Image (tube, rainbow, N blue to C red):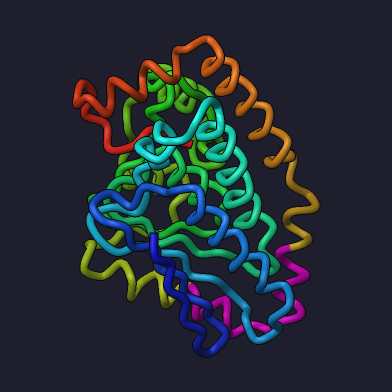
């Protein structure tokens, strides 16, 4: 997934672009983590705008890549790289604004759920297809977007949720037409970039310090069940079925 970066007036814009569905492969996830971690050493950056080209923000991990790797290497590296990408969003030295368009599934929820602010297009849908794919993960991040019983139903049923409903919960700041998404998200990022750099970094660290949930440890716990399911053969069978065209999901998840 080519990830392009521009820095202008304190805003670092990262654009993910990997047609057709913006699936997050292993190298992409590590690259995203490296870029986000690097802003700790760049005082000129005061906010990150994370967005995507194409018809969706992120449809999950790259199932073809996982199945192409030997033994359990694919699922292990997918787990590790997703962990690093989500961690880097959360631990980024500056606030991260996610501009979510179209589908935001699995890994997309991991990225958006760990962002500081989410702006979405009116066609955006969020969901975790993990249970249908013999995996678990990113419920940690979904719980930052929806109430607990809603999250449980979404996990068990694999049903998606609209950006409008998330806006009602307050987890999405604004919902706009897709054609206005980048501009609106840019306005939100600019408002943060206009603050004093040292103070906004302190504010981000402060918010993380009082967070009631250790999102890194919580997500790592979830990933243990994904590996168990893989050892049982459930995950592998589900991914093979997807690649044979027996499932219609855009991606696997986190």
Q: Residue at x 55, y 23 (%)?
A: 226
Q: Position of residue 12 (x, y in %)?
A: 52, 77
User: Does 69 lie within the magenta span?
Assistant: no
Q: Looking at the magenta stretch, what is its main secondary structure?
A: helix
How many callouts does the rendering have?
Answer: 0
The image shows residue 250 at horizontal and vertical percentages of 27, 38
11 or 234: which is nearer to us?
234
Residue 253 point in image, percent of width and height: 42, 35
Left or right: 201 with respect to 170? right
Q: In the rendered view, would you say 204 is above or below 114?
A: below
- Residue 72, located in which quarter of the rendered image? top right
Location of residue 34 by image quarter = bottom right
Residue 72 is left or right of residue 161, and the answer is right
Residue at image point 44% right, 13% down:
234
Q: Nearer the viewer, residue 192 or 9?
A: 9
Question: Most extreme residue toward the top, as rendered?
Answer: 232
Indicate whether 128 appears above or below 246: below
Residue at figure coordinates x 51%, y 54% from the top left: 27
Q: Does residue 139 show up?
A: no
Instruction: Examine the structure image and report whether residue 192 is included in the region drawn in magenta.
Output: yes
Q: Residue furthest bottom?
A: 9
Q: On the rendered structure, is 64 left or right of 116?
A: left
Up-down relation of residue 28 to residue 185 (above or below):
above
Quarter of the picture containing the N terminus is bottom left
* Residue 170 on image: x %, y %: 48, 48
Q: Residue furthest front?
A: 70
**Which residue range is magenta in the image?**
189-204
Whether residue 55 is visible to the viewer of this picture, yes or no, is yes
Q: Which residue: 46% across, 82% down? A: 6
4 w.r.t. 104: above or below: below
């Amino acid at each position: 997934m080519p990830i392009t970066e521009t820095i202008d007036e304190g805003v670092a814009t990262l654009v993910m672009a990997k047609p057709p569905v913006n699936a997050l492969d292993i190298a992409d996830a590590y690259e995203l983590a490296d870029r986000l971690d690097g802003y700790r050493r760049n005082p000129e950056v005061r906010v990150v705008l994370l967005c995507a080209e194409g018809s969706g923000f992120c449809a999950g991990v790259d199932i073809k890549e996982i199945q192409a790797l030997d033994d359990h290497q694919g699922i292990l590296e997918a787990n590790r790289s997703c962990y690093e990408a989500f961690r880097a969003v959360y631990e980024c030295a500056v606030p991260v604004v996610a501009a979510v368009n179209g589908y935001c599934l699995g890994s997309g929820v991991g990225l958006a759920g760990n962002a500081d602010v989410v702006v979405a297009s009116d066609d955006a849908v969020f969901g975790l297809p993990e249970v249908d794919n013999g995996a678990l993960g990113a419920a940690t991040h979904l719980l930052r977007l929806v109430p607990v019983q809603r999250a449980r139903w979404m996990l068990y049923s694999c049903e998606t949720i609209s950006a409008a409903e998330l806006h009602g919960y307050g987890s999405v700041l604004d919902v706009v037409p897709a054609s206005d998404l980048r501009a609106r998200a840019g306005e939100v990022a600019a408002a943060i970039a206009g603050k004093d750099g040292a103070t906004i970094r302190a504010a981000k660290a402060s918010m993380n310090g009082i967070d009631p949930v250790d999102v890194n440890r919580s997500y790592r716990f979830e990933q243990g069940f994904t590996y168990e399911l893989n050892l049982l053969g459930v995950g592998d069978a589900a991914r093979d079925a997807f690649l044979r065209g027996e499932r219609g999901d855009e991606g696997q998840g986190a």
